[in-house]
Amino acid sequence: MTVPQFVAHDPDADALRATLDGDPHAFNAVARRLHLRVYRFILRQIPLAEDAEELTQETFLEAHRKLRAFQGQSLFSTWLLGIANNLARNFRSRAPQFRYQMVDDEALRHHASNEPDPETIAASDARMAALQHALSQLPEELYQPLALISLEGLGYEEAAQICDLSLSALKTRIFRARKKLRALLTEQNQMSLFQEME
């Protein structure tokens, strides 16, 4: 059976090699390191924390099962997010009432922070609601690339691998997604909420 290769700078390579060599605890270290990242990634697409957590667990189980099929053409974490992306997409297709969920980073923090003033909170809430509504109207092929770049902060190459697109195709979809998003916000008379941020 082919042994997976890993890119030289992959921080999970040693633990994954140990996993493949039969170490029953090595994959747990990888799961601990990447759990929050995968959970946050899924939570932005699935509105219920319980569902997001279940899909996160499924992601790691699927990755463990398919580890020997890993091609090593990207970081393991990129491949893992691709699995998470597919599971989240399948979940949304089975439960169409769940569209894309725009989750404020504050909801993902485990500790309290200094609260902004009520006016700032109200403006932020209004922007979030308008943006979430517009995002929910984007077709899947436009939403996914935009979310990976703008919401998840991934690089273009990593996002292209997760979406299984060429780099040029990814950039084209992101351009189209931003144009469509702006048009939707304009059509819904919501662009004024964002003008002060430009």
Image (tube, rainbow, N blue to C red):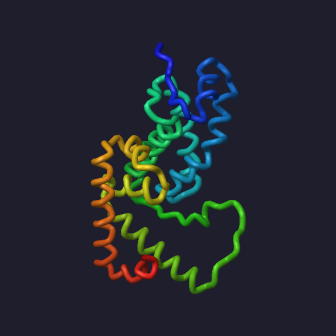
Q: Decide if residue 153 is on the left or right side of residue 141.
A: right
Whether residue 102 sits left or right of residue 31 in the image: it is: left
Image coords of residue 162 (percent x, y): 41, 43
**Where does residue 104 sit, x and y in percent of width and height?**
55, 66
Relative to 105, does residue 79 appear above or below in the rendering?
above
Q: Nearer the viewer, residue 21 or 137?
A: 21
Residue 174 falls in image quadrant: bottom left
Based on the displayed image, in which of its 4 quarters is residue 105 positioned? Answer: bottom right
Classify residue 44 as left or right of residue 162. right
Which residue is rendered at x = 54% and y = 30% of the image? 8
Residue in the image at 35% along x and 40% along y: 164
Q: Is residue 40 above or below residue 82?
A: below
**In what quadrant of the picture does the C terminus appear?**
bottom left
State the image coordinates of residue 17 (x, y, percent, origin top left). Answer: 60, 23
* Residue 153 % position (x, y): 49, 55
What residue appears at the point 57 percent right and 82 percent down from the top-left corner? 120
Quarter where residue 190 is shown:
bottom left
Residue at 32 percent of width and 71 percent of height: 182
Query: Camera-side residue: 121 or 136?
Result: 121
